[in-house]
Amino acid sequence: MADIEGYPGSSMHGVTGREPVLAFSVASPMVPTDTTAKFDLPVDSEHKAKKFKIFSFANPHMRTFHLSWISFFTCFVSTFAAAPLVPIIRDNLNLTKSDIGNAGVASVSGSIFSRLVMGAVCDLVGPRYGCVFLIMLSAPTVFCMSFVSSAGGYLAVRFMIGFSLATFVSCQFWMSTMFNSKIIGLVNGTAAGWGNMGGGATQLIMPFLYDIIKRTGATPFTAWRIAFFIPGWLHVIMGILVITLGQDLPDGNLSTLQKKGDVAKDQFGKVFWNAVTNYRTWIFVLLYGYSMGVELSTDNVIAEYFYDRFDLNLHTAGIIAATFGMANLVARPFGGFASDYTAKRFGMRGRLWTVWILQTLGGAFCLLLGRSNSLPLAVTFMIIFSIGAQAACGATFGIIPFISRRSLGVISGMTGAGGNFGSGLTQLLFFTSSKYSTATGLTYMGIMIMACTLPVTLVHFPQWGSMFLPPTKDTVKGTEEHYYSSEYTEEEKAKGMHQNSLKFAENSRSERGNRVASAPTPPSSTPNHV
Amino acid sequence: MAAPGFIIAALVFSCLAANSCAVTFSSLPNNLIVSASTKQGQVLKAGEDKITITWSLNTSLPAGTDSSYHMVEVKLCYAPISQQDRAWRRTEDDLTRDKTCQHKIVTRPYSRSNNTFTWTVQKDVPTATYFIRAYVQNSHDEECAYGQTTDSHKATNLFDVQAISGRHASLDIASVCFSAFSIVSLFGFFFMEKRKAKSSQQK
């Protein structure tokens, strides 16, 4: 049965725990290979790749993957490029602590809205143009740093650069046109982690560039402005590469994406209402604000923290700060893996405990980071904090697909927005006022992380239970079918709108843990990791 | 589950134990008389204007006070008003952690009198209110005395520095050019593709 839902990126990879979790390919009996197609990778009937060959650049599938994640990486680099240079910028522009904090809040706030708009843009003109337009229209905002001469200008430019983080949506969307739904989870998850690494790489790149430019004779207050040209050029280069080397679909370019069949089977209003009235949505919006959100906040403050607290030079502070963001290379996929692994034995309860343990661990080590007075301890605590927070991000998206089948896209989007909102909030609360030092701010943030992770104990699925409670004994309400089909009204069920949900429910029985005898291979539905 | 908690407790204790031997500012005698050519409230331009600093030992002190004095380090220091909301410039009594004086002017061997130096305000000095302080160090590089151009409350005889903006016309022009290139090439490629698609559809 063709999974043509019009929702890009459909996959529940790893969900049943029965497939190999880190599957790099889908075997032929599950998805038939189209043997007439001449592509570098085996493809399905829609010519989407069934295999994920990481180190290949072959057109179109793997080339799309690399163009996608590098574009997103570039936008992360430019959004957080100011952070490691703040010790110089604050002297040049005569900034106070609140100026710096507010600019940090602004840098993550813009993308809350731009990500929502990008979703609509991708629907209209396709993800390739969405990516290109955003990345090349945000290049001038990066170049604008050379004009900044006041706190207000600094805040405005960081706000505008932050819009570019919406490339995430376009890139995930684009890859779902290229990869089969059974491996899209791993592909998108890898891209998410590697793109997020940009927040770490920038802490290395910018001080390095600043050093080199100073050596050629520029004064410090000019050198940092010149350094910003490099992320700006990266934007332009990636934009040109994407528009020249990329293509919309495996079979070529179309001036408009042809939508097959009836795309919008459902009404957005109903889908949205179903998402916001499910309390579990809001709990995970809060949780993601304290895993992804604190990751973004820490990207903004950590280099300056090491520079000031331990008297390191810009270069060294940047290297240490970079290890925080670069842990994403493995930490985020590890979180997803841990979630899937515990689900094999303990089902949904295992997944919930995994999120709670990872995120609370992150919070505990954030607290210790703020309290440590010696450099080696601070670095150790920071690394464990980063692994905890980033793995929690991965583990969160191991649960999101199960909250709702009907509103998965909206819930994923809301969760992502919650991440950015959490980042803005934590920066505003802890790193903007002079009432307490950055060290104390980190300590309080750690406490808040642990407190705001507690609501996950309240997440209860009637069919699977919660962290402490068993599933309901009611024979009707305690089935997966009942949970997922109750998202539809009786008239909608009469129209058969809930059929895909029923299939999904059957496959999600594996979330009961090893009490389940067998579960067939999963169908499709997508977490758009944000 | 108790073992990790134990390890964490041990780590916490060890990190709180980190300390360093340090000279404190409050223990230093104000034995030098330091004066500068700046007037109260004067605004100096970074990279252009000069300050002439003179320093000498307070002659009313008993002989032998300066027996261990070896070097003199003259620094530019932030006045309290420029330290507000800026924890990276805060004053701490422990001199190894004190961030009040971040800009070195000159280091000279110690001599009792006739010390002058003319300094051009450097281009990386930020816009702020300042005073000048000279630390006397012994042969082990430890501070033993000081002198400053202002009073003990750091309220009199302060001057301002106006920093360079760091902006250049050439940078601004380059910025505009690259931005224009980005937008023009975006729409250029976009329309080129549209035309190719139209012509291939017509074929």
Image (cartoon, coloured by chain):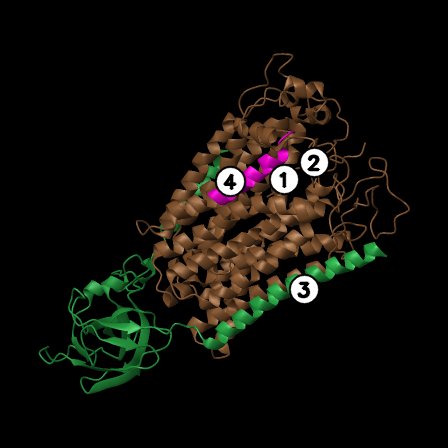
Chain colours: A brown, B green
Position of residue A221 measured from the top left corner of the image (x, y, whole percent): 42, 71
Q: Mark 4 points at which residue?
A: A418
Q: Name the residue under label 1.
A: A336
Residue flagged by tag 4: what amino acid is it?
Gly
Q: Name the residue under label 3.
A: B188
Position of residue A417 measured from the top left corner of the image (x, y, whole percent): 53, 42
- Judged left or right of residue B161, residue B63 is left
Q: Earlier in the sequence, mark 4 or mark 1?
A: 1
Q: Is residue B136 above or below residue A295?
A: below
Q: How far apart are marks 1 and 2 (CA)?
A: 9 Å
Instruction: Please identify, in this view, whether the residue under mark 3 or under mark 4 is nearer the observer.
Output: 3
Q: Earlier in the sequence, mark 4 or mark 2?
A: 2
| In contact (CB < 8 Å): disc 3 and disc 1 | no
Question: What numbered label is drawn on residue A14?
Answer: 2
Q: Residue at x 67, y 21 (%)?
A: A492
Q: How far apart are marks 4 and 2 (CA)?
A: 24 Å
Viewer-nearest residue: A378 or A131: A131
Q: Mark 2 lies on which chain?
A: A
* Region of the chain picked out in magenta, as a range: A406-421
Position of residue A219 measured from the top left corner of the image (x, y, whole percent): 43, 76
Q: Which residue is drawn at 80% across and 34% down?
A: A2
Q: Which chain carries label 1?
A: A
